[in-house]
Amino acid sequence: MTTIVEEPRPPFPPFTRDTAAQKVRMAEDGWNNRNPERVALAYTADSQWRNRNEFPKGREQIIEFLTRKWATEHEYRLIKELWAYTDNHIAVRFAYEWHNDKGEWFRSYGNENWEFADNGLMQKRYASINDLAIAESERLFHWPQGRRPDGHPGLAELGL
């Protein structure tokens, strides 16, 4: 039998405004690095997702999902913003920019609802997402691939 490692991931619930915002930024940073195996470690081994019309369950399916996603969403750049929080729940709004294989640019907008286990890993992630076609000249997320620089404006500052 394979043992699944679940390294605790602080900060832990119950969340404060500061620790919830820290969780949001950690998630944004992970997704912007686009490493499916590393991102999946932030979720419980049996994590349940809803992402558009897909329902991955568990780390293996999360890795498969993210691998497919980032193979088609090129130059992916994401900004997440804390919307609300309670003891072990966080609500987030986000936007990300990317282009497809044809070079067509999009800004995808969405909301996520997260539920965390006591060890700080996300056990449920429900995302609703809409895509807006944009011209390359309308892009707002202009940082080198990877982590968004601390000085780059967030969603509210960008009017999104």
Image: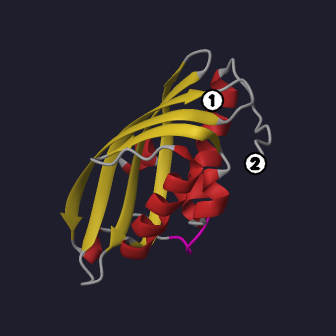
Viewer-proximal residue, 28 or 61?
A: 61
**Element on which disc 2 rests:** loop
Q: Nearer the viewer, mark 2 or mark 1?
A: 2
> Is there any visible trace of residue 160 in the rendered image?
no
Q: Residues within 10 Å of mark 1 (few under 14, many from 20)?
A: many
Cα distance in 3D space between marks 2 and 1: 35 Å
Q: What amino acid is at disc 2?
A: Met
Residue pictured at 27% horizontal, 47% vertical: 53
Residue pictured at 48% horizontal, 62% vertical: 64
Against 33, is 129 above or below? above
Residue 30: x and y in percent read 62, 56
Viewer-proximal residue, 44 or 81?
A: 44
**Element on which disc 1 rests:** helix
Residue 20, numbered circle: 1
Q: Residues within 10 Å of mark 2 (few under 14, many from 20)?
A: few
Q: Main secondary structure of the magenta part?
A: loop
Give the extent of the magenta segment: 143-147
Q: Name the image quarter holding residue 55.
A: top left
Residue to which mark 2 is pinned? 1
Residue pictured at 47% horizontal, 64% vertical: 77
Residue pictured at 71% horizontal, 32% vertical: 120
